[in-house]
Image: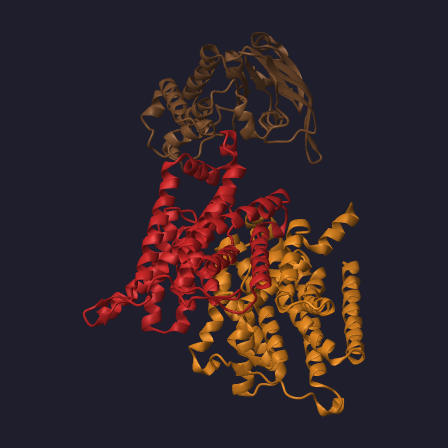
Chain colours: A red, B orange, C brown
Amino acid sequence: MIQILNTVLIGITAGSIYSLMAIAMVLVWRSTRVVNFAQAGMALLSTYFGYEVIQISGSYWIALPVAMIGGAVVASIIELVIMRLLLKHSSQGAIASITPIIATLGLLGLIKSVIGYFWGNQDRTIVSPLSNVGFTFGTNTLAISPMKLFIIIAILVLVLSLTFIFQRTNLGLALRASAYSPEISRLAGIKVDLVRTIGWALAGAAGGVAGMLQTANGTGTLSPDSLEFSLLLAFGFIAAVIGGLDSLIGAVLGALVLGLVLAFVLTYVGGSLVFITAFVLLLIILLIRPGGIISQKAGRRA
Amino acid sequence: MHKLKSNNLLRLIGFVVFGFFLFYLSNAIDELRVYQGATVAMYVVAISSIILLTGYSGQVSLGHGALLAVGGYGAALLRNNLHAPVWLSFAGAVLVAALFGSLLGVTAARLSGPYLAGTTLALAVGLPSIANQFKFLGGEQGLIFDIGLPPASLGETFSQYKWFFWIAALTALIAMWWLQNLLRSRYGRTWRAVRTQSVAAELAGINTARSKVLAFTVSAGLAGLAGALLSMTISTVSPSAFPLSLSFALATGAVLSGVTTLGGVMIGAVTLVAIPEIADAFTQRIGASENVTANLPGLMVSGLLIVVVLFVPNGPVEQFRNRRKK
Amino acid sequence: MSLIIENLTVEHGAIRALNNVSFTVKKGQLAALIGANGAGKTTLLRTLSGLNKPTHGKAHWCETNLLHGKPEMLVRHGVSHVSEGKSVIPELTVEENLEIGALWRSNKKEMQESKKTILELFPRLGERLAQRADTLSGGERQMLALGRSLMSKPELLLLDEPSLGLAPLVIEQIFQSIKELTKSMGITILLVEQNAMGALKIADVGIVLNLGTVAISGEAQSLIADPAVRAAYLGY
C-alpha cells in the first residue's frame, strides 16, 4: 500500500517537472510551429547560470529566478537571431519540413559545446536547498520530501499563472491568436514577430525553472552530457505530444500520465525498461489518439 | 533507352575505378588513416540511408542510431551464437534491421515532420537501453563482434585495420551501387513523386503509405548494414556504442551532404571524420585548454550544421547544380 | 485625402500579377474592384496591406505610404484589410475575434466602446459572444470578420470577396452593411468582388481589372450601363 502511494508521489514529482518542459515545447510550437529539440540544452544553460549565482551568492533562492530570467533571455536571443533568419530563408524542397528540426538540433550541440567551453565537462553540484529526506508517516517514510513538495507547489503556481496569462490577458490573447493564424493576427494589428519572441521567452523561462528543479530533485549534478537533461528532452517532447502539442493543459496532463506510468514501471518492472516504455506509450498515443489525449481532432499532420 | 544503358555502364565503371583507387590508397597511407577510411565507409552507408529516407521519401529520422544498433546486435548475435561467416552476419544485420524498420515504418507512415522526428528521437534514447534488461544482449558491456584476422594469403604484414577498410569500403561500394540503381528505378521515382506531390501521387494510383513503408524498410536495412560495419571497426556492440549523439551526427552528416541527392554523401561522411582531426590539429597548435579541446569538435559540427541549414539548406551539391543551371 | 495608386507592379517570380496599375479612390467613397479570376484583385489588396511586396510603383493613403509598412503597422494608420474567405480565427471565441482587432491600442475602455458599437451594428454577434467562431454560419463569420476590422476604427477598409460562398440572401445583407459603413461611418472602402453586379450596385466608383491592368474605370452607374462591361463581367 505504502509502496503504491510512494510510486504515485514519485510519479507526480517527476511528472510535474516534465510538465514544465512540455509546456516549454508547447509554447514554442504554438508561437513558431517549431518543435524545439534545443529546449533541454537551453534549460541546461539556464541551470548553469543558476549554478554560477549559487557560487557567488550561496543561495538557491536567488539562483532560481535568475535561471528563469536567463532562460528567457537565451530563448529570446535564439528566436531573434536564428529563428527569424530561418523563416526569412525558408527553403523549398525535401529539406523544408525538417529545416527547423535540424536547426534546433544544431543549437542543442552548439549550446552543449558553449557550456563545455565555459564550465568544462566535469560534474558540477547544486545542493538541494530543502531537505530531500522524505516525511515520515508512522514507521514508513514517504517518497515526498520538503524539496519535492516545494517542486510540486512551485510548478502548480507557474502552470496556473501561465494559464491565467493565456486565457485572461491581452498578451495571452495575442499569443493564442498569433499561434492559430499569424496572417489574420497581423491584419488585426498584432505584432506577431514580437509575440513570437515573447512565446520563446516564456518557454525559455519555463525551461530554466525545470532545469533548476530537476537538478535539485535528482542527483544534484550538472554536466553538459548530463543524462537527466536527455531525459528532460525526450520526456518533455513525449509529454507534449501525449497532450497534443497545442494545449498547455494537455501538456500538464500528458506529463503527469507519463510521470506516473514511468514511476510504476521503475518500481515494479525495472529501471532499464523506463525509456522503452515511454517510447511505446508515445507510439500508442500517436496511433490511437493522434490529436493527443484531450483533443477531438483526428489526424496529425503538421 | 540506349543512352540510359551506356550511362549505367559508365557509372559501373566509375564505381570499379573508384574501388581500385581506394585499394591503392589503402596501401599508400598510414594505419590511422586507413582505419578512418573504414569509418568514412560506414558513415557513407549510414548517411545514404538517411538521404534515401528524407530526400527521397520525405520522412525524417533523428534516431538512426537505434537502427544501427539493431543491425549491430543482429550481426553480433549471428556471429557469436551461430558462428556465421562475416558476409552472412552482415546480411543478417540488413535483414533484421529491415524487418524492424518495416514495423517502425508502418507507424512512421502515419506521422509527419516533428512528430516523426520526436518519435525516432525517443526510439534512439530508448532502444539501446533494452540491452541492459536482457542477458543474451550482454548488458552494459555488450557483446563481442570479432570478424577474425585477415586471411593469411594477404601476407603477414597485412594489418587488421586494412582488413576492416577493405571490407567496409567494398561493402559501401556495393551498397551505393545498388542504391543508385534502386533510386533510378520505378521505386525511386515513386518515392520522389510521393515526397513532392503526395496528393497527386495518390490520385495517380500510387499507394503512398506502402511506398513510405518500403522506403523506411530499405533505409533501415542500410542502417543495419552501417551498424554491422560500425560494430566491426570497434569490435563490440554495446548500448554506449549507439548514443543519441551518433543519431545526431548521422542527421548532421546527411544535411551537410545535402538530403536531396546521393551525390554529396562523401562530403558529409568525410566531414564527420575530419572535424575532430581538424579541431585536434588546431587546438594542439595554439595549445588550447582542455575545455576548448573537448568542445571544439562539437562546436564546429553544430555551427556548420546551423550555417548549412540557414544558407545552403539543400546541400552543397544541389546548390552547385542550381548555380550551373542558372 | 484619398487612396492614390500609381503604376503599381507586382511580380510573383516570373509571373507579373499586376502591371502598372493606377487609380484613385476619394475619401468616403466605396470603390468596387471587379474582374475575372486571376485578374490580380487579391494581389492588389494584399500588396496594399503589406502582405505582398511590390516590384515598383506607389500607393498612398492620405500621408501613409502603403508600400513600406508591415500589415500590423498599417492598421495603426487606419488601414484595415479583411482577407479572402471568412477571415476569422476559428479556434477563438466570437468575443476574442473581435478583441484582437483592438489589442494594439492597449486601451480597455476604447475596446469596450468599439465592441458596443459593433454589436449594435451586428446584433447577431452579440448573441454568440462566448461561442467559438467555427460554430458560426458563413454569413455570421463574414460579419465577425468585418466587425473585427471595425474594432481598429479604420479609415480605409480593404475588403476581399465578402460574398464568397454565401447564400444570395445573406450576400444582400452583407452588401447593405458595407454600404452603411461608408455612409454612416465615413469609411473609405475598396471592395474586391467576383459578384460584380452586386458590388457595382452599392459602389460609387468601379474599377475593372483584367490580366493585371486596369481595363476600365469610372462611375459605378456608368459601368453598369456600359455594354462592354455588361457583356464581359456582368454576364448579360
Judge left or right: residue B251 versus residue A160.
Answer: right
In this rendering, is residue C168 above or below B15?
A: above
* Residue C86: % across, % down: 46, 29
* Residue A160: % across, % down: 34, 46
Of residue A126 and residue C64, the one placed in the foreground of this image is: A126
Taking the spot 36% from the left edge, 57% from the top edge, the residue there is A16
Judge left or right: residue B286 versus residue B47.
Answer: right
* Residue C117: % across, % down: 38, 18
Quadrant holding the C terminus of chain B: top right
* Residue A258: % across, % down: 37, 60
Residue at the far front in the pictured view: A57
Q: Can residue A287 be seen in this view?
A: no
Taking the spot 77% from the left edge, 48% from the top edge, the residue there is B323
Quadrant holding the N terminus of chain B: bottom right
Judge left or right: residue B139 versus residue A168.
Answer: right
Judge left or right: residue C198 versus residue C57.
Answer: left
Taking the spot 53% from the left edge, 25% from the top edge, the residue there is C75
Of residue C102 and residue A64, the one placed in the foreground of this image is: A64
Residue C221 found in image quarter:
top right
Give the total number of marks visible in the rendering.
Answer: 0
Residue B15 found in image quarter:
bottom right
Q: Is residue A95 visible?
A: yes
In this rendering, is residue A273 above or below B210?
A: below
Of residue B158 and residue B318, the one placed in the foreground of this image is: B158
